[in-house]
Image: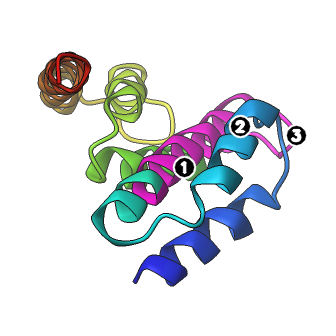
Amino acid sequence: EYDRAWADVFSVLKLGGDIDPNFLAELKQARPLKGRQGLEVVNAAGRNIWNRIGLWYFGGDGVTEDPAEAVKWFRKAADAGYWPAMYNLANAHRRGLGVKKDETAAAVWTSKAKKAKAASRKSITQKGSQ
């Protein structure tokens, strides 16, 4: 599972786009990590990348603009717990871009994003106090 996850991340990176070189350097340094810590790193990287690909499709940045394709990538990242992607999904539903306009779905994704963001901040605060 670990090696497959890393292969997925690096195959997605080959798509190009404006991936921060510092982010790539961090990924390469993290590659030797094994076990739970390694999976946490690769899963976090995947969520970030999936959301970024969604943004490329949403705005036509280096790819043909395709809001429906953007929504697929946002959903993949959101389903993996990435709160910025949850906000992006909420926005797509609210505006009817790539999906049918749906205020209820927008509200659900906004609520999920707020909860995930709060949990993420709490986790960071706890790690910092250890």
| Comparing labels 1 and 2, the label whose residue is closer to the camera | 1
What's the CA distance linking mark 3 and mark 2? 7 Å
| Comparing labels 1 and 3, the label whose residue is closer to the camera | 1
Q: Is residue 130 left or right of residue 5?
A: left
Q: Amino acid at mark 3?
A: Gly
Q: Is residue 72 visible?
A: no
Q: Which mark is residue 50?
A: 1
Q: Are marks 3 and 2 in contact (CB under 8 Å)?
A: yes
Q: Quadrant of the C terminus?
A: top left
Q: Is residue 50 visible?
A: yes
Q: Is residue 75 above or below residue 85?
A: below
Dot 1 alpha-carbon crowd within 10 angstroms: few under 14, some 14 to 19, many 20 or more: many
Residue 13 placed where, x, y %?
74, 56
Q: Amino acid at mark 2?
A: Trp
Q: For mark 3, what is the residue?
A: 62
Q: For mark 2, what is the residue?
A: 56
Prevailing secondary structure of the magenta residues? helix
Dot 3 alpha-carbon crowd within 10 angstroms: few under 14, some 14 to 19, many 20 or more: few
What's the CA distance linking mark 1 and mark 3? 15 Å
**Among the two numbered marks 1 and 2 on one chain, the one whose residue lies closer to the N terminus:** 1
Check the image and tell me how it is coloured: rainbow
- The number of discs equals 3
Residue 89 placed where, x, y %?
37, 33
